[in-house]
Amino acid sequence: MTRVPIIGITSHSRNAAGEVVLPGTYVDAVQSVGGNPILLPPTQTDPESLLSVLDGLILSGGGDIDPIHYNGEAHPTIYGIDDDRDTFEMTLAKLALVRKIPVLGICRGMQVLAIASGGTLIQHVPDIYGDQINHRLDNPLRPIPHDVEILPESRLFQLLGESRLNIVSWHHQAVAEFSSDWQLAARSSDGVIEAIEHLHHPWAIALQWHPELSMQDPAHQRFFRSFVSAMTR
């Protein structure tokens, strides 16, 4: 009998009620393609030992990353800074890349992977790209759908089988620069970097959008199945 892959998913820190929180859609997405999800709260003190028991890693969405990690300056729109989470996830990202563990970065998780590899962020997308495309809705904050273009030469195109995809996003920051270990895989029509993929890793892909919110879409189902199928031990 084939063992079910164990996939760690990073979570938020404890909230005011003492609860460790993660939207259930991440768990649902992993389980729907045959993975066994476990939550990774940022209070863990030994990230290296965690990766020794994981078959795959998802760096999930959440608040902004402290600009100190990419030599950036403070911006008035930055919110949700969590030093423990930043440190924990940066360490996990670097270890997963070195150990060649399948890793998926989602929204904030994409930014973590980019920064962990030496990249930088756009601190507020409208400052650079205007409002041609809304990448989140405000008042109240909530996700919004829009289209992205998948580069035909990318691995992501092979996995999704689509050159244009309707996705769900929820962010106000984005990757500005990424290291030469990564290549561009998708953009939105306003120019925002929507996906990158690692050139020297068996399966390391980062999406600025939220694929776990689109599991009714066959393309996103194929994407998650590819992630799980990469986990052989």
Image (tube, grey):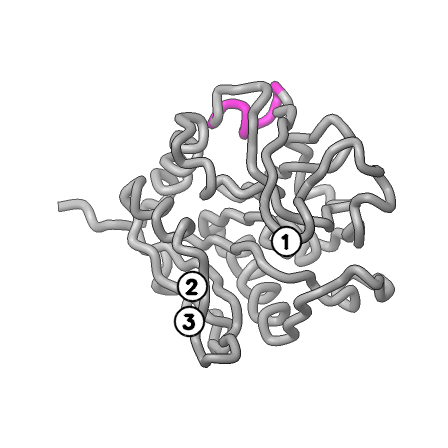
Q: Which residues are magenta?
A: 152-159
Place residue 75 in its image quadrant.
bottom right
Question: Which label number is shown at residue 117?
Answer: none
Looking at the image, which residue is at 49% across and 49% down?
103
Q: Which kind of residue does numbered mark 1 sit on?
A: Pro
Q: Which residue is under mark 3?
A: 49
Q: Which kind of residue does numbered mark 3 sit on?
A: Ser
Q: Which residue is under mark 2?
A: 51
Q: Which residue is under mark 1?
A: 140
Q: Position of residue 195 (x, y in %)?
A: 63, 37
Q: Position of residue 41 (x, y in %)?
A: 46, 71
Looking at the image, which residue is at 59% across and 20% down?
164
Q: Earlier in the sequence, mark 2 or mark 1?
A: 2
Q: Secondary structure at mark 3?
A: helix
Looking at the image, which residue is at 47% across and 76% down?
44
Q: Position of residue 94 (x, y in %)?
A: 59, 60
The answer to which of 67 and 53 lies nearer the viewer is: 67
Is 158 one of the magenta-colored residues? yes
The mark lying in front, picked from 2 and 1, is: 1
Q: CA distance from mark 2 to mark 3?
A: 5 Å
Q: Position of residue 122 (x, y in %)?
A: 80, 49
Q: Secondary structure at mark 2?
A: helix
Main secondary structure along the magenta-highlighted residues: helix
The answer, for residue 128, to whether it is visible in the render is: yes
Q: Check disc 1: other Cα within 10 Å, few if <14, some if 14-19, many if 20+.
A: few
Residue extending furthest toward the left: 1
| Marks 2,3: beta carbons within 8 A | yes
